[in-house]
Image (spheres, helix red, strand yellow):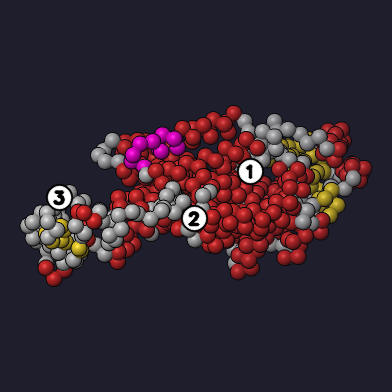
Amino acid sequence: MLVGPCPGGSALPLEPGPGEGCADADAVPLLLPPPDEGPAVGLSSDPSPPEPHPVRATALSSTTATARNARTPHLRRFSCRPRVWSRHHPHGKHQEDDIRRTAAWRWLPPLLAVLLGLWGLERAGADGRGGMWRDESVTWQVAHRQLGSIWELLGQVDAVHGLYYLLMHAVFQVWDGGGPATGGLWALRLPSVAATALAAAGVAAVAHRLAGERAALCSGVAYAVLPPVQMYAQEGRSYALVAAAVVWATYLMLRERWVAYAAVLLLGCWLHEFAVLALLAHGVSAWRSRGWRWSAAVVVVLLLPLAVVSARQAEQQLGWLGRPGWQDWAAYGVVAVAVLLLARGAAVPRELVRVAVPLALLPPGLLMAVSLVHPWYVDRYVLYALAGLALLAGTRLAAARGWRPWPLVAALLVPFGWWSVWLRTPESRKDDVLAVAAAVRERARPGDPVLFMPSRRREWLLSSPELYGTLRDLALARTPAASHSLQGTELPTEEIWTRLVDAPRVVALLDPAGQPLDPYPREAVKRQTLASHFDLCSVDEVRGARIALYAQPGRCP
């Protein structure tokens, strides 16, 4: 029985509200001090509460969310009527009861992410053949090299993806599916599917800590269904893994598990160093915590070796990028407006706002600002920022009552559904290296000379070694593995010209019409020699590529 002081200091029963009628055997006694001893705080009679922890007082505290969701009784008045408060009443549940009650929904966000990830995983086209674009082809061919060869490559280029290549090398040692043209696309993409499921579970865990069970379910589901999240859940690149690391680092920050926080965030940064921007987003909430400051220092110091190496490779790695265009700024503006609108009002706890808004806006905003000087911005580099948007959207939806928000949700599901279907087609990516290889296989004869224009398009055939090995690469000087590079090195311009004019016919692989032409001397001599010494016999358009057949004058088939 709960008892409280009546006037004069005598013990009287406390009005519990709806718990009347429960068994006396389950009553829990609680003695409160008389009025002249000050208000009770928990079970303590000390009238002055302890000094709040600097982190717990901001976004790292779950006190507000716990009070909101634990459904504890509100003490409105004292009553002298005997009432009993039972632990079997919903307002008095034990923690074990809460765990059993919430265990089922905890599986829904990661399960949904897995189902969406496995749906159309091969991105098959109308012919039933799976699709793979050139960045995934780089993962495939690099991760299949020997460990020593991978290490030598990272000293020259692509160090930013080095840890991911090593992880995929380990995956392919266990199972590679027999090649990308067979079941290899599953081996290539399943790690990203698993990482997206882990990230969805992490978003739910963050929301549960800051806003309760209903917000956790809605936020985890919202993250899983976001089309960009679905897109990179089905790519053989590191971005889904980085997002999972950042999301769980956010959760560990809230738990103040600083050693684990530093380790998980450092893992994300070594998978892609732009994950370090999440450290700045976390700092908005946690900068007063000594644990966070030490963790941030450790992450920065241990990331420095990768930063130094990748800075030397930046021009070669990111030289193809331009400054953010108006489409990038418009997309960021739309997201920023949505984030700020969702963060308004009392429906979203302030603790969650302090975590979600910086995570959603700071990493992409800072990278776009830096890209005005050094063009480094690509939206997938900060994919993890969508976790902040999902936290706000899910919490807002969980707090909604009545039917009003559901027409908007239904309206959004229509374009999201169309977008999701489109993402599972080869047309959703810039090119399709497997379609290019199939087209070359139909048009080329064994021993035919092949020319890549520009040379980096050699990647279109490197992941199909059974085809590439039957052709004669006219411009190649050293293979990618031998030259410790991604696409190999090419001959001097004079030797390329000599080999080219002696060839009776050439299969040329080119970018789509209208793409900028590389100004390098090797690329110029290829174009000029084909125009002056060959007839163009045919041109076939393939997704993101052109396959042109050239022959000596009068020798077109």
Q: Residue at x 35, y 54 (%)?
A: 49
Of residues 306 and 234, the one nearer the viewer is 306
Residue highlighted by disc 2: 253
Depth order, front residue of 513/483: 483
Helix, strand or loop status at disc 3? loop
Numbered mark located on residue 77 in the image: 3
For image coordinates 57% across by 37% down, the residue present is: 365
Q: What is the distance, in whole Å, between disc 3 and disc 2 at their CAs? A: 39 Å
Q: Earlier in the sequence, mark 3 or mark 2?
A: 3
**Type of amino acid at the residue the image marks with label 3:** Arg
The image shows residue 67 at horizontal and vertical percentages of 30, 52
The answer to which image quadrant residue 543 occupies is: top right
Please state the extent of the stretch shown in magenta in the rendering: 338-348
Discs 3/2, front? 3
Residue 93 picture location, percent across and down:
24, 62
- Residue at left 15%, top 50%? 77
Q: Position of residue 17 (x, y in %)?
A: 14, 53
